[in-house]
């Protein structure tokens, strides 16, 4: 089937090269359309074959494993089973190498009062020290930001760049609230959100 399609494709290419300026576009369109239909049929058949192969049951053959019987001994003769010839010295000889010690160079003591060593928390990383407790944060995400932590974080990050509460309030009123249905029936959470934002600017 593939060879037939390739031959038809070569025939179309030959006719295009031979006719050039006298090319019959309508005839060419019909030939290419017919060829395309055959390609689609071939594609469908190949995908069906691939599905049949992938759904064939796999027959697992259980291999028989021979297990050596444990050594036996005669209790009446007080004979113990033979043990491999292993001594304490050669027991670990191959697995443990000599330890290597590396001398650590002494470093200068860090100045704990320097700004570089001041511990930073998540609120410091947000800039402007926006301090919002975990419970409030979860309540705002659930009730004001359609349960989207990404949207909440995006808004908080934007608020943190403003210089005053008035700028932040203007941003919330004109850009945030319209995006979330103006926080209808969420007035108590909205008031709490504004109160916390205002406290961070005071």
Image (cartoon, rainbow, N blue to C red):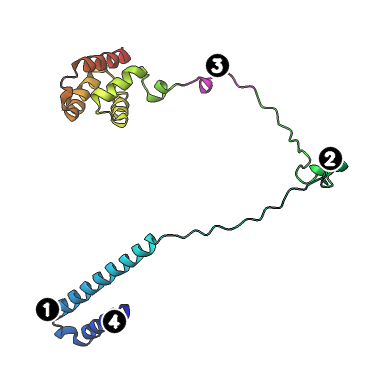
Residue tagged by mark 3? 113
- For marks 4 and 1, give the CA distance: 22 Å
- For marks 4 and 3, give the CA distance: 83 Å
Residue 35: which quarter of the image? bottom left
Q: Is residue 168 above or below residue 12?
A: above
Residue located farthest toward the left when viewing the structure as drawn: 26
**Local SS, label 3:** loop
Residue 61 disc label: none
Q: Are marks 4 and 1 in contact (CB under 8 Å)?
A: no
Magenta residues: mostly which secondary structure?
loop
Whether residue 132 can be seen here: no
**Local SS, label 1:** helix
Which of discs 4 and 3 lies nearer the camera? The answer is: 4
Residue 26 disc label: 1
Q: Is residue 35 above or below residue 106?
A: below
Name the quarter where the N terminus is drawn: bottom left
- For marks 4 and 2, give the CA distance: 76 Å
- For marks 3 and 2, give the CA distance: 56 Å
Along the line of sight, which residue is nearer the eye, 29 or 197?
29
- Looking at the rendering, the stretch of residues picked out in magenta corresponds to 109-120
Q: Earlier in the sequence, mark 3 or mark 2?
A: 2
Along the line of sight, which residue is nearer the eye, 95 or 198?
95
The percent coordinates of residue 133 (x first, y second) are 36, 17
Q: Are marks 1 and 3 in contact (CB under 8 Å)?
A: no
Residue that appears at 36% across and 20% down: 128
The percent coordinates of residue 139 (x first, y second) are 29, 20
Residue tagged by mark 2? 88
Residue that appears at 14% across and 85% down: 22
């Amino acid at each position: 089937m593939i060879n037939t399609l390739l031959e038809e494709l070569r025939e179309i290419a030959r006719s295009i090269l031979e006719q050039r300026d006298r090319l019959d576009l309508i005839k060419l369109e019909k030939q290419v359309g017919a060829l395309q239909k055959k390609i689609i049929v071939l594609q469908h058949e190949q995908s069906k074959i691939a599905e049949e192969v992938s759904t064939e049951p796999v027959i697992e053959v259980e291999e028989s494993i021979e297990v050596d019987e444990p050594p036996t001994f005669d209790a009446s003769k007080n004979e113990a089973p033979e043990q491999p010839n292993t001594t304490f010295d050669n027991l670990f000889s191959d697995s443990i190498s000599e330890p290597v010690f590396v001398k650590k160079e002494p470093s200068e003591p860090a100045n704990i009062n320097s700004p570089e060593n001041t511990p930073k928390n998540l609120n410091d990383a947000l800039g402007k020290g926006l301090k919002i407790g975990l419970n409030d944060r979860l309540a705002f995400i659930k009730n004001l930001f359609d349960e989207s932590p990404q949207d909440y974080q995006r808004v908080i990050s934007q608020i943190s760049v403003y210089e005053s509460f008035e700028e932040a309030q203007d941003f919330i009123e004109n850009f945030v609230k319209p995006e979330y249905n103006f926080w209808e029936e969420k007035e108590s959470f909205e008031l709490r959100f504004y109160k916390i934002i205002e406290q961070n600017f005071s």
